[in-house]
Structures are given as structure tokens and as C-alpha cells.
Image: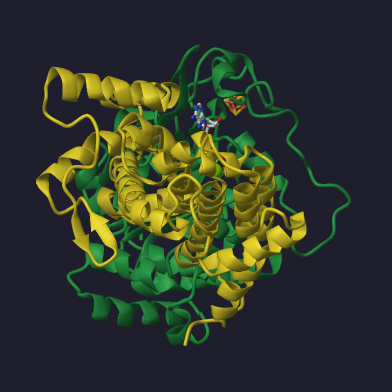
Chain colours: A yellow, B green
Amino acid sequence: MFAFILSRILQALPVMFTVALISFAMFAYVGDPVAIMLGQDYTQAQRDALVAELGLDQPFWVQFATFVVNAAQGEFGLSYRLSRPVAELIAERAPATLELAFTAAGIALLVGVPMGVYTGLYRNSWLSRFFLTFSLVGVSLPTFLIGILLILVFAVWLGWLPSFGRGDTVRIGFWTTGFLTVSGLKALILPAITLGLFQLTLIMRLVRAEMLEVLRTDYIKFARARGLPNRVVHFGHALKNTLVPVITMVGLQLGAIIAFAIVTETVFQWPGMGLLFIQSVGAADIPVMSAYLLLIALVFVTINLIVDLLYYAVDPRLRIGRGKGGH
Amino acid sequence: MSNAAPLLQVRNLRVEFPTRRGTLVALDDVSFEIAPGEVLGVVGESGAGKSMTGAAIIGLLEPPGRIAGGQILLDGRRIDNLRYEEMRRIRGKEIGAIFQDPLTTLNPLYTVGRQLAETMTTHLPIGPAEARRRAIEWLELVGIPAAAQRIDSYPHEFSGGMRQRVVIALALCAEPRLIVADEPTTALDVSIQAQVIALLKRLAREKGTAMMLVTHDMGVIAETADRVAVMYAGRIVEIGPVREVVKHANHPYSAGLMASIPPLDRRVERLAQIDGAMPRLSAIPEGCAYNPRCPQVFEKCRRQRPELMDAATTRAACWLFDTETDRE
Ligand SMILES: Nc1ncnc2c1ncn2[C@@H]1O[C@H](COP(=O)(O)OP(=O)(O)OP(=O)(O)O)[C@@H](O)[C@H]1O
Ligand code: SF4
Ligand SMILES: [Mg+2]
């Protein structure tokens, strides 16, 4: 088990290194951070001093090596735009994005899986047809449009929910949470639905397809022939056998949710990492951008590891090297 | 044995499949009985309706297939028109089933112990601890070595033959009085088929379980069955005691089928084959369904369909045995 995790971490290292190289290389020559930091009026001496301080006069590989060593310690230097440590900025923004992403993923799972099971079991009911039609809308409408429509209906017309921001937050250690206040929860609803809708419909369609497949198998017929109650057959035997592909997709989609929170955060002015990233792009704030990209890569790698561990938990056939017959 | 009150009665069973191009009749006027503890062998070419009959009895016909006529009675009680939940209580508890392929009949994600225990706790008034104890007992009974250790193994950790033994344990563990076994050894290695059949036969005898045994293996039939039903194109064409049907079949189709069995005691150059193929459900000929292939066909066979009638020691659906028919 430990060896398995270790080997996965070792496999992830080249991935992280490549992402680091790409993000560094892409941004190393984009824009002129010095000009941005110094504003309109500066002397050549001031410019040279800043270039030296930022290490921009060093050769590419030296800059990159410094970048990697620092990054490994969570040290990404100062934001060009805000003149504050990048790590601090990200730590400030991460809770907002993570709370949003996990709420969105939670909604997608808790609603998408039962809807998928239902539409798989009752293929021809009118409710199934309605769900499928609705899922087409979820898949085909772009996120920003869904967000704007939700704002229009629930914030502008009905006035039930706020249209932007995160509401009041409570600080617990370094973490700021919106889960503990009414306004924080209210502010979370629309962006979470916007962000999770696409994944919800994907999960529903995947679970449905897998259920249809599994319900045709001999072991389900045999489970029925053994007289097991429908509840056990459907939610035990059948659903469990759909889990491996579902876990794969949910894992990938959770990464996507975090990465693509950018659009939702922009629409709802959600003070998360995505919004920070967009603002940094506008200002060619390289340290923030590289840190963000690396963080997203780290999120994907971590999720992949968790997905592999879950496979291992769900499907005994994937447990290699296990002794015959238990203990 | 045959004068005991029947455990299972199938009366004029008709199963239909509505399709876009009209209704297919998969089973037509199928009637037979199984007495308590009796083994009824069911044989016939592929597509004759053997599996369909079994599926109808356990109430698990694949939609859109449906029972369109007739009755199925267990202990004199009709079970063909029960609601799903009522029939569910009968499946496993009163009627067990064994399927063909042990590699696909067990849920790969649950241990065999769990699958046994859940079947027993569903049907018997016992708790999890007792169910686990009995699960080990059942594994021992079906000949799994080191059962107490193997109970927590997953299906993929067993060989095909061992898995079919587990399936047999699953079918029997709630002590049903009837087992529908659909080609229980066809998917197994030839070398272990005999062992598995012997096990099934022994357990059925010990527990007094009746069995409907579908198989293509006449050797198995001869050794295991008390009576045999021969099916052709969705009907029973002959039914009778095993020795009579195997040795002195009356219906020309059964006679041809039995002649195609390799004899055990001598080598033959070439086995007799029945010429032609069984008709598709959408093109069953008028009159006797076997008439295009029958060597003894005569005029009436092409016009009128024969019902089962007394034919010496068996009952056969063939005009040859109709005392009122003149063969022109
Ligand atoms: N879904 C379906 N729609 C239409 N016809 C079907 C369907 N399923 C089965 N049949 C037909 O019903 C008939 C009986 O099939 P069944 O499976 O009972 O045959 P069998 O005697 O068990 O054959 P085998 O020895 O190959 O198992 C076959 O002709 C088959 O083509
Ligand atoms: S009824 Fe006629 S065609 Fe049919 S089996 Fe008998 S003899 Fe042959
Ligand atoms: Mg069959």
C-alpha cells in the first residue's frame, strides 16, 4: 500500500516538473513586469536595480532552477501587481475556490448519481425523459450563460439570492469559510449550481449508461433469481459495479471544476483563485500565474492518486499481490 | 415418484415476444409437471425454448417477452400472475436457479461469503453471524477446500469449476424445493463437468430438491434425470421416463436426437445427424413444426398440428401415434 502510494508520487514528479517548465517558460517572456511595477516614470538605474532584485538578469536555466527550488518550498516571490508574497495571496484566495468547487462537486454527485440510477432503471418514464432533455441543456449551454441566466432569475427578478461576492465569512485559523453564515451560504448557491451543472449532467448520463450496461449482466439476473430485494440489487449490486468509471470521471471533473472555476468566479465576482488568476493575466503578474498553474497541476495529480486509491477500495480484482483467502 | 402430488405444474404455457414485425411465439402450449424430488431433464436443439421455459418459471422473462397464456403452479398455487414483490419472495426461497456461466453469474465486487449470507438473510429468519456460519457450511458441502478461509475471497480468486460450486451453494442455500438449472456445466472444462453434475445430483437427492435440468449432454440426462422432455420450436414434442425416451424414443425428432449421441461402448465412424435446421420463430411451418425434416412425414402432418398423445411408454406430439389417423 505504502509502496503503491510512493510509486504514484514518483510518477507524478515528472508531470509536475514539466508543468513547472511550461508555465515558467510561457510567462518568462510575456509582458514586461518591470514596466508594470515601476509605472510611467523611472530611471534606468531604478530599472536595473529591480531587474537584479527579481533575478531577471540571470540566464533562463538559473531563473528556472531558482523558481523550482523556491516553488518546492511554497515560495513564489512577490506579486508584481500587488507587491505581496504570492503564497500569501493564494492562501487567502484558496478557501473561497475550494469551498465553491467542493460544493459544486457535491451537488453534482448527490443529484447526478440518483438521477442517473433513476433514468437507468426507469428508462421510459416521462421523468427520465425530462431529466435527459434537461441534461442536454446542461451540457450544451456555456457556463457563463447559465450563470447570467441564474443571476437574472434569482437575483434580479426574484431577489432571493445575491448576484455577486461571497457574503460574510468566518475566520478559522488561516481558513475563511462561508459555510457558517446565512449570507455566506446564500451567496454560495448560484455559483455552485452554475459550476456544477455541467458535471451533474455528465455524471447523470454516465451513471445511466453504466446502469443500463450492468443491469443486463448475468450477475444482476442471478441476484434477482436469488430473490434479493430490488433495493439491494439496484443500489448494492448494480450501482457498485458502475462506480469505477464514475469515480474516474468524478475525479477528472473535480480537477476541471477547480480549474474552470475561473469563468464562474468572474461572472459572480467570487473572490477565489480563478478571479485572482484573471486579474493577474491582465497585469502580466507572472509569479501569481505560475503559482496558480502549478497549484492546478498539483490538484490534478493529487486527485489522480485519490482516484487510484478508490479503485483499489472498490474493485478487488485490481488489488494486486493480495494473498489468497484473506487472513 | 410420479404419483405424488406435483410440486410444479406448467399448463398450456404460451410466451410471446411482441416485435415490430408481428408477435413471435417463443413457447406454445407447453405443459408438464415435476413431482417433489424429481429431476426433469429438458433437451432440444438451440433455440427450442428451454431457457425461455426456465425464465418463465422463475418469473424473470426478459421484456418484452411475456406470458401470454396458460398457468404455472407451485404446490397448486398460481405463481405466473404474482406481483414482482410476491414472486421475489418465492425466487431463491422456493425456486432456486443455476445459470450457465459461473464466470459471469457471481458479482465480482462482493465476497462469496457475503453473497451467500445476503441470500440466506433475505429468505431465512437468521442473523448475520448465523448466516456466516451456514455460508461456511455450504461451501464445505459443495466441496470448496478450506471453506473457512475461502469465505472472504472474491469470485475471481476461484477457478471456473469452483465458482460453479459456489453458484450451486447460492441456489440451494435458502433450501428451495425446486431448482431450475440451465446448462449448469456447459461452460465448464470437460474434465470437471462430471464432478459438478454429480455434486448437484447428490445435493438434490439429499435435500429432496426437485430439479428442471436443461442440458445438451445426453449422458448427463441418462445419469441424472428421472423423466425427460424433448423440446422443438417452442413446444414439447415428447415427454416420458428417461430410459424410454433415451432408448426407445417414439417421436421421430427425439429418435433422431438420441441417435446423434455417441455411444459409450463402441466407436462409430460417423454420428447420425438430423438434416436441416430448426425453423426460426417467425417461420414455423404449418401443421407439425418438424414436418420439413421428418423422414416419416405424411399428408396430415402438413395440415394439422399434433398435440401430445399417448405413444407406448411416453407421450409424443406426432400423428404416427394417433389411432384415428390413417397414414395415406
Ligand atoms: N428478446 C427476444 N426477442 C425475440 N425472440 C427471442 C428473444 N429472446 C429469445 N428469443 C427466441 O426464443 C427462442 C427460445 O430461446 P431459448 O433461449 O429458450 O432457447 P434454448 O432452447 O435455451 O437454446 P440454447 O440451447 O441455445 O440455450 C429462440 O428461438 C430465440 O431466438
Ligand atoms: S407429426 Fe408427422 S411430421 Fe411431425 S413428427 Fe410425426 S410424423 Fe413427423
Ligand atoms: Mg438456453
Q: Is residue B166 visible?
A: yes
User: Is A258 in front, or is A226?
Assistant: A258
User: Is B315 in front, or is B168?
Assistant: B168
In the picture shown, does residue A320 fall above or below A137? below
- Looking at the image, residue A279 sits to the left or right of residue A152; the answer is right
Quadrant where the C terminus of chain B is found in the figure? top right
In the picture shown, does residue B106 fall above or below B132? above
Q: Position of residue B261 (x, y in %)?
A: 71, 51
Q: Position of residue A214 (x, y in %)?
A: 46, 45
Residue at image position (29%, 39%) is A192
Quadrant where the N terminus of chain B is found in the figure? bottom left
Location of residue A15 by image quarter: bottom right
Residue reaching furthest to the right: B269
Residue at image position (44%, 37%) is A279
Q: Position of residue B259 (x, y in %)?
A: 71, 46
User: Is B320 in front, or is B205?
Assistant: B205
Q: Is residue A126 visible?
A: no
User: Is B37 in front, or is B60?
Assistant: B60
Q: Position of residue B99 (x, y in %)?
A: 49, 54
- Looking at the image, residue A162 sits to the left or right of residue B92; the answer is left
Number of numbered labels in the structure image: 0
Residue at image position (53%, 84%) is B145
- Looking at the image, residue A106 sits to the left or right of residue B110; the answer is left
In the picture shown, does residue A34 fall above or below A92? above
Location of residue A14 by image quarter: bottom right
